[in-house]
Image (spheres, rainbow, N blue to C red):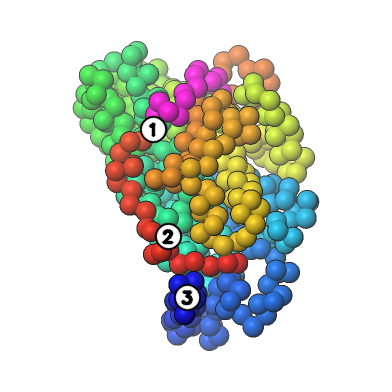
Amino acid sequence: MSDSQDKTTSRRSLLKQSALAIAGAGLYGAAPFYGPWKHNHAWAQAAQKKPLVIGLTMDASGQYAASGGEERLGAMMAIKEFNDKGGVLGRRIEAIHMDTETTPATGSRVAERMITRNEAAFLIGAVHSGVANAISQVAQKYGAIFFNTNSSSPTEAGKDCHRTKFVWDGNGANFSQAIVRNAMKTSGRNWVLLTNDYVWGHNTAKSTRAVIEANGGRVVEELLVPQNTRDFSAYLLKLQQIKPHAVATAVGGDDIKALRQQVVQLKMHQQAAWINNQQDWPDVYGLGPEAIFGVFGTTWYWRLNLPGVKEFVAAYQKQFPGMAIRVPGNVYHNGYMATRELLRCVEEAGTTNNIAIIKKLEGRKMSAADRLQHHEAWIDPATHHVQQTIYMAAYNDQPAEKDDIYKILSNVDPKEVVDKDAAGACKLETYEATPSYEA
């Protein structure tokens, strides 16, 4: 028996055992499901006529529901573009979505179901880093390629990396180097960290602390904020007592909306410099000018003066008319770019074989013009993290139109903010240890 036959047999056995275990637990009914892999089905010869299924693992509820909705729209626009041209490798693309609820346990269940029952060949989507990590563990077990579109804990491309996972957002370490280092020049020496109490917050705050201390600053206090906090009065009272020169927040989703509104109510945005490590577009859209205080990082803005940006915005508005968020932001951009690049790699590989596609992705270079950014991007082959332009932004007090609410202060070449710690922490599984399949 050849090596490839050995791997196929092993793959089939793994899937069968898992499906039987699921059926035995009464989760998905009595019949076993063997996943999307054509060698597990009697209709193998007709497999190429079947749709290519992509599982969208995005929040529709919980802290990151707004961002989950936006990244799903981005993925759907890329899928529509390919379907309008006849699909990929002659197969129509079918997307299925299940709410991951901003909860790691739900993310794990959704990933398991999509792969073993819904026959998803690939998984795309995540905002919460704990959810992304949970999905990626399931994906690696089956060898399913998973694109983490928007969660940005440094651990996602560090100690929690996987051969099948690719991380598309800038991470907390990238933003800390780009934003905090510049803020240190003008903000003062004494800092307080205000941190969402989960993996993204912890690791982003760790990176921020390192940059502050490396540049002669001092973290006088770190305040941990539970997820889904809506009343920040106790934290803001503490800040009034400490009187720091700067507050560095790693707070996201609906939490940051509530925090911004309460800071403005107490006029505390005028008492210290505020630096938000990364600000997602759905988290500030519609808040009003006063609430968009401080300096923050992002990976894209809809009014960047670059070729193709206006056309991209127009395509969003044409495909999704009447949206509450009238223009696309960084979360949508990541969802679109990740999905488009995956489907391009499937086409270039000429196969849905996961290992062949992974090898197409590793080290892949993407031009600045193609990604609508200022600098070339690439996928680090050692960590599977997309290295891309980081922008420093603030509120735009001279908007050209209603939704022109950001002022881009600077753009940073990704070479200048590479997360060097991630490469040391990441230990990708070997190709041989990664289950191989063809959808």
Up-down: is 171 above or below 373?
Answer: below
- Which residue sits at x=21%, y=27%? 220
Q: Position of residue 4 (x, y in %)?
A: 49, 71
Q: Earlier in the sequence, mark 3 or mark 1?
A: 3
Residue 431's tag is 2
Q: Position of residue 155 (x, y in %)?
A: 35, 46
- Which residue sits at x=55%, y=85%? 31
Residue type beneath disc 2: Tyr
Q: Which residues are magenta?
A: 406-418
Q: Quadrant of the C terminus?
A: bottom right
Q: Position of residue 73 (x, y in %)?
A: 65, 47
Up-down: is 9 above or below 423?
Answer: below
Residue picked out by circle 3 = 2
Classify mark 3: helix, strand or loop: loop
Does the magenta segment cover residue 417?
yes
State the residue in front, 375 or 249.
375
